[in-house]
């Protein structure tokens, strides 16, 4: 809601609306139809970003990310010092 309605940076607001919010709304509508057909649902942009970020953090050795067979996932921070440094940014 913040980025959609209250951002003072118009360019950022437009980009977020186009690249994330509008795409997410469309994918969620499409996923309802796909689910009814028993087909695999599509990832929303936020879900895709999450997977990419978690993957990079895992590759960097900052966390251990485990994906289960049912697609649920869990993580454990393995390098607390580096994690704290990243949070300072």
Image: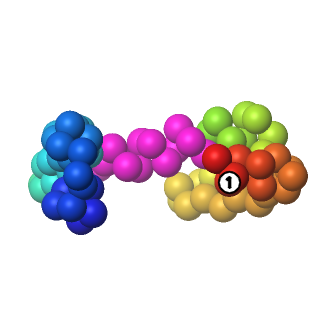
**Residue 56 lies in the magenta-colored region:** no
Give the side of residue 45 with respect to residue 57, left or right: left
What segment is highlighted magenta in the picture?
Answer: 39-54
Give the side of residue 59 with respect to residue 44, left or right: right
Q: Position of residue 34 (x, y in %)?
A: 18, 51
Q: Residue farthest to the bottom?
A: 1
Give the side of residue 80 with respect to residue 53, left or right: right
- Report whether residue 67 is seen: yes
Which residue is tagged 1? 87
Q: Residue at x 64, y 47 (%)?
A: 89
Please tell me whether residue 62 is drawn above or below residue 59 in the rendered image.
Answer: below
Q: Residue at x 66, y 61 (%)?
A: 74
Q: Secondary structure at mark 1?
A: helix
Along the line of sight, the residue nearer the viewer: 27 or 37: 27
Q: Residues within 10 Å of mark 1 (few under 14, many from 20)?
A: few
Give the side of residue 80 with respect to residue 6, left or right: right
Q: Residue at x 68, y 42 (%)?
A: 57
Q: Residue farthest to the front?
A: 8
- For residue 15, which quarter of the picture? top left
Along the line of sight, the residue nearer the viewer: 88 or 69: 88
Q: On the rendered image, what quadrant is the N terminus found in?
A: bottom left
- Report whether residue 40 is seen: no
Q: Position of residue 86 (x, y in %)?
A: 71, 47
**Residue 50 lies in the magenta-colored region:** yes
């Amino acid at each position: 809601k913040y980025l959609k309605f209250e951002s003072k940076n118009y360019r950022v607001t437009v980009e977020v609306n186009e690249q994330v919010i509008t795409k997410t709304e469309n994918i969620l509508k499409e996923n309802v139809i796909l689910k009814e057909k028993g087909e695999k649902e599509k990832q929303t942009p936020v879900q895709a970003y999450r997977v990419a970020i978690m993957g990079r953090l895992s590759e960097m050795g900052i966390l251990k990310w485990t994906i289960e067979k049912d697609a649920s996932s869990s993580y454990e921070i393995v390098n607390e010092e580096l994690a704290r440094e990243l949070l300072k940014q």
